[in-house]
Image (tube, rainbow, N blue to C red):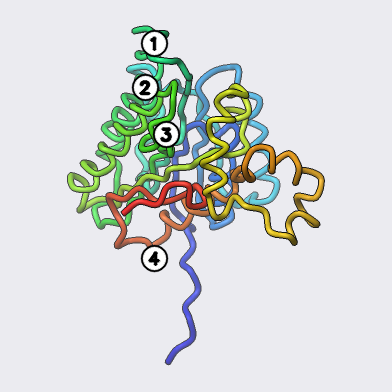
Amino acid sequence: MSSTPRLQSLTGKLAIITGASRGIGAAIAQNLASKGCDLILNHSSAYSAGDCQSVCSDLLTVYPQLSIRVVCADVGTVTGPRELIAAAGGKQIDILINNAGTSGNQYLAQVTPEEFERQYNVNVRGPLLLVQAALPFLPHDRSGRIVNTSSVSSSMGLKAQSVYGGTKAALEAMTRTWARELAERATVNAINPGPVETRMYLGTSDEFQMQIKPLLEMTPLAQLSEAEKKGPYKDRAEFFEKHGGRWGKPEEVAGIVGMLCSAEAGYCTGQVICANGGMVMMR
């Protein structure tokens, strides 16, 4: 029997990553760049321009042979997705990561039409229009990869997430539809992170984080081992015990995205892949 083959690299492929200025998006950029992938890093406004440019500069320092550039386009607008795809200059788009998202927690009585529109424009309409605009540039040999960033909120029924949870459930539904429609072009999958140590999650209220506590207590990979309590999490063990377990790391989520983008993942499509340490165990 021959030795185990090495994973194929992504050299020569082009990926577009939305919401790439920080957190999970920046970690995905790092993961794909380490595999040789050229990147278009997207951010939505002047507010995130500096962060996104820093991600780009840091990656080019380590991977100067790659083509990595930043494009500002608000995927929450009607025109932003087309502008982002146009920035690829007609090149084949091998990988499309719908990572940009927005959140907001409101109890049912406080939900407004404006808040509904704000979240659905970014989390649902944005990915739909982006994939639609990318259609002429996707591969025709099933080598394309589309990965959508969903959330455990799509299936957990968390309080105050009528809107946010609904956007992520819609994104998962579109993932399955696109997997069928684009079967000759690309695989289409979603990931469903739980609490991840990002600016977005750290901005949630103490009340919301305490709602998550019993769920983290049931999450296998959120529990600190004795070695972790004495090692990398020594200074934070008490903090995570208070919260029911540790949060995920952006690079852990990015590793799952990188796996889905590989050639070896070519027989996986239409799935919501666990990226939450086992908080959600789907059938």
Who's the residue at 55% across and 43% down the image? 216
Q: Amino acid at mark 3?
A: Ser
Q: Residues within 10 Å of mark 2 (few under 14, many from 20)?
A: some
Residue identifier under label 1: 111
Q: Are marks 3 and 2 in contact (CB under 8 Å)?
A: no
Q: Secondary structure at mark 3?
A: helix
| Residue corresponding to mark 3 | 153
Q: Quadrant of residue 226?
A: bottom right
* Nearer-the-camera pick, 90 or 53: 53
Q: Which image quarter is the N terminus in?
A: bottom left
Of discs 3 and 4, which sits in the foreground? 3
Of the image marks 1 and 3, the number of the one nearer the N terminus: 1
Which structural element holds mark 1? Answer: loop
- Asked which quadrant contains residue 141, the reply is bottom left
20 lies left or right of 165: right
Cα distance between the residues tagged 1 and 4: 43 Å
**Disc 2 target residue:** 162
For mark 2, give the secondary structure: helix
| Label 3, label 4: how far apart the Cα atoms are | 29 Å
Going from N to C along the chain, the mark reached first, 3 or 4, is 3
Task: Determine whether label 1 and label 2 are within 8 Å by CB.
Answer: yes
Is the Cβ of the residue at disc 3 closer than 8 Å to that at disc 4?
no
Q: Give the labeled residue for mark 4.
A: 264
Disc nearest the viewer among 2 and 4: 2
Other residues around mark 1 within 10 Å, as few (<14) / some (14–19) / many (≥20): some
Residue 235, picture quadrant: top right
Separation (CA) of disc 1 from disc 3: 17 Å
Q: Are marks 2 and 4 in contact (CB under 8 Å)?
A: no
Pointer 4 local density, CA inside 10 Å: few below 14, some 14–19, many at least 20: few
Residue at (31% x, 39% y) in the render: 172
Residue type highlighted by circle 1: Val
Query: Camera-side residue: 18 or 179?
Result: 179
